[in-house]
Amino acid sequence: MPTLISFLFSLTIASTVFAADYRANNCEVFVDKVAAWSGSHGYRGLTLKIKTLNDRLDGAIKMVAFHSMVHSSPKVLDFCAKHPAANGNSNGCPNVGKWISRPAHPHFGSDYFKIDLELKHDYNFEHVYEGVIFVETVKGTRYWLKTGHGGNFFVDENMRSDLIRLGSGGYYRQGKDMSTADNFEYLNPSRCR
């Protein structure tokens, strides 16, 4: 006869979802295109267009995101001290030095997503993002995209400048797309298509 403890233990095991984390070595998720953009009031940023190969995932997609943090510096900390969040406008300061998942949004179907990353404007400090891109399935499995050396990506003004030199660029989130498989392999180390 089962005891109450063994019954509760079996209930706990049955209701537990066993999630796994994998490195995206088989193009499960990759940055297909990237674009640099700028706008009025000094707005500058990048748009990452992220592709998933859904037949290589263990289930339907729950989320695609850039899990990252904004680096702090004495200049950034000083800016945040002088510009506290008010009226729902956080100016990015509450996220400095904290790892958060910035969701990508569907863009043309169930296997293509985009995320806009603001790097700077006249009313904010320059953002330097460090992070990894991932796709999470409804089963809780996450496929993590890292650099070719297995580290985190750095997305910053230097990357934007490199993209502009290569021919990307445009006005306010309408920058010319640059194929990462052909022209910017840092974001697509396996040259996935």
Image (spheres, helix red, strand yellow):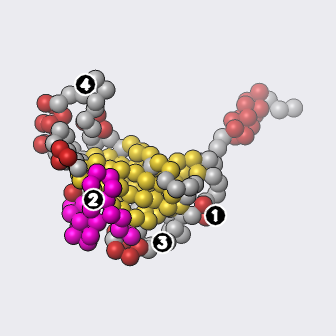
| Residue 166 on the magenta segment | yes
Query: Where does the image place residue 145, in percent across and percent down from the top left?
Result: 45, 61
Give the vertical position of 75 relative to 31 (above or below).
above
Circle 1/circle 4 CB separation < 8 Å: no
- Pointer 3 residue: 192
Alpha carbons under labels 2 and 4: distance apart: 31 Å
Disc number lying in front (1 or 2): 2
- Pointer 4 residue: 86
- Pointer 1 residue: 55
Alpha carbons under labels 1 and 3: distance apart: 14 Å
- Pointer 2 residue: 170
Residue type at mark 4 is Ala
Which sits earlier in the primary sequence, circle 2 or circle 4? Answer: 4
Query: Where does the image place residue 182, in percent across and percent down from the top left?
Result: 38, 76
| Left or right position of 60 against 86 | right
Residue type at mark 3 is Cys
Crowding at mark 2 (Cα within 10 Å: few <14, some 14-19, many 20+): some
- Residues in magenta? 158-180
Which sits earlier in the primary sequence, circle 3 or circle 2? Answer: 2
